[in-house]
Image (cartoon, rainbow, N blue to C red):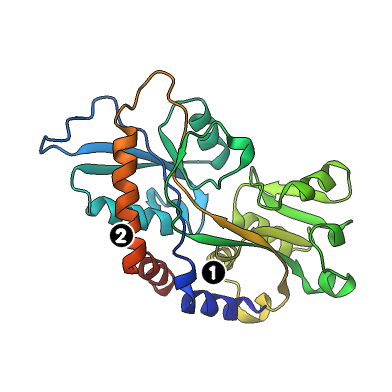
Amino acid sequence: MNFKRALKNIIKTTGCLAIGCVFAWPVVANAQTVQSSNIPVTITLYAEDSNIPYAFLDGADPDGIYVRILEEAFARMPQYRLEIVNVPFRRGMELLKDGQIMGFFPPYERKDRDWIERYSIPILRETVVAICSNDYARSNNLFQFPDDFAGARFANNAGYKLAGNAFFEMVEAGDIVLEEANTTASNLRFLMAGRVDCYVNERMAILAGMRELGVDKDLSRLFNEAAIIGQEFGYVAFGPDPDNQWPERDQFADALDATLRQMRDSGEIDRLVVDYFAY
C-alpha cells in the first residue's frame, strides 16, 4: 500500500479508530484529595517520550494523539488537573510494575502483564503492520507472518512486542535477525539505508515517522506493507499499589472512563485524530 494513500484512508476511516485508548497517572503526594473541595486534585500521568504520533516529547512539551485526548478529557473534569511526565517505554513499565507510579500510557494489554490491576476503557484501535523494502518483498513469497519471513533482518522499537510471540521465538532461534532502536525514526532510517529488510510497528506511527523524516512520495513508494499482523487497543494501565499510595485511584479511573466514553460516543475522539493529522 502506498503510504500517502494509506494516510488518506486512515483520515477517512477514523470512525474505526475510536475504540480504545491508554493513559496513566500517579497523584502527587501533596495533592488535595477531598473531592468536595474547589481545589482540583493533581493527577500525574506517565507517558512514552518517543511514540510518535501517540505520546512523545515535542521539545520540552508532551504531545501526541493520546495526550490531546487526555487534555480534552481533563477539561471536562474540572475536579482534576493533569500533569504529564514523559519517560522511555521500558522505564515507564518498570516504574508501573514496581508501584512507583499510578499509571502509564499507552501500553497494550498482555497476558504476561497480569500484574497490571486495571485498564481504562479502550479509545484507539491501532493496526500493527510489517513494512518491507520492495526488493525484499518481491524476492520472497510473503503470505504468512512470521513464518514466511525466515532469514529476514527486522527493525523493532526497543521493548515493543507488537510482532507477537511466534516472531520473537524465531528471533531466539536465529531464524530472524533483530535490530532495535528507541524511536520509530531511527528504525525507519535503518530500513531506508538497507540495514534491515522490514520493520514492525503501528501503521499511523510509521506514517508519522515518515512525515517526521520528510520522506517524499517517490521514496515512500520503495516500501510497502508486507503483512497486517493484527490490531491492538491502547489503554491507561494502572499498576499495583501495595502501600495504598493512591486510595482515590478507582474513583478517578471511573470518572475518566465515563468522560472518555462520552467523547468516544460523541465523535470527539475521531475529531481529535483527524485534527492531529490535519495540522
> Which residue is at the front of the view, 231 or 105?
231
Q: Quadrant of residue 153?
A: bottom right
Label 2 residue SS: helix
Q: Position of residue 56 (x, y in %)?
A: 46, 51
Q: Quadrant of the N terminus?
A: bottom right
Q: Position of residue 40 (x, y in %)?
A: 18, 39
Q: Residue at x 50, y 36 (%)?
A: 92
Graded by Cα atoms within 10 Å as few (under 14), some (14 to 19) or many (20 or more), the crowding at tag 1 reads few
Q: Residue furthest left?
A: 38
Disc 1 versus disc 2: nearer the observer: 2
Q: Please tell me whether residue 201 is drawn above or below residue 247 in the rendered image.
A: below
Query: Which residue is label 1 attached to?
Result: 211
Q: Residue at x 42, y 50 (%)?
A: 121
The Cα–Cα distance between marks 1 and 2, rounded to whole angstroms, is 31 Å
Residue kind at label 2, given as amino acid type: Gln
Q: Quadrant of the C terminus?
A: bottom left
* Mark 1 or 2, nearer chain start: 1
Residue 262's tag is 2
Q: Quadrant of residue 265?
A: bottom left
Graded by Cα atoms within 10 Å as few (under 14), some (14 to 19) or many (20 or more), the crowding at tag 2 reads some
Residue 23's tag is none
Q: Residue at x 79, y 74 (%)?
A: 134
> Which residue is at the front of the view, 59 or 7?
7
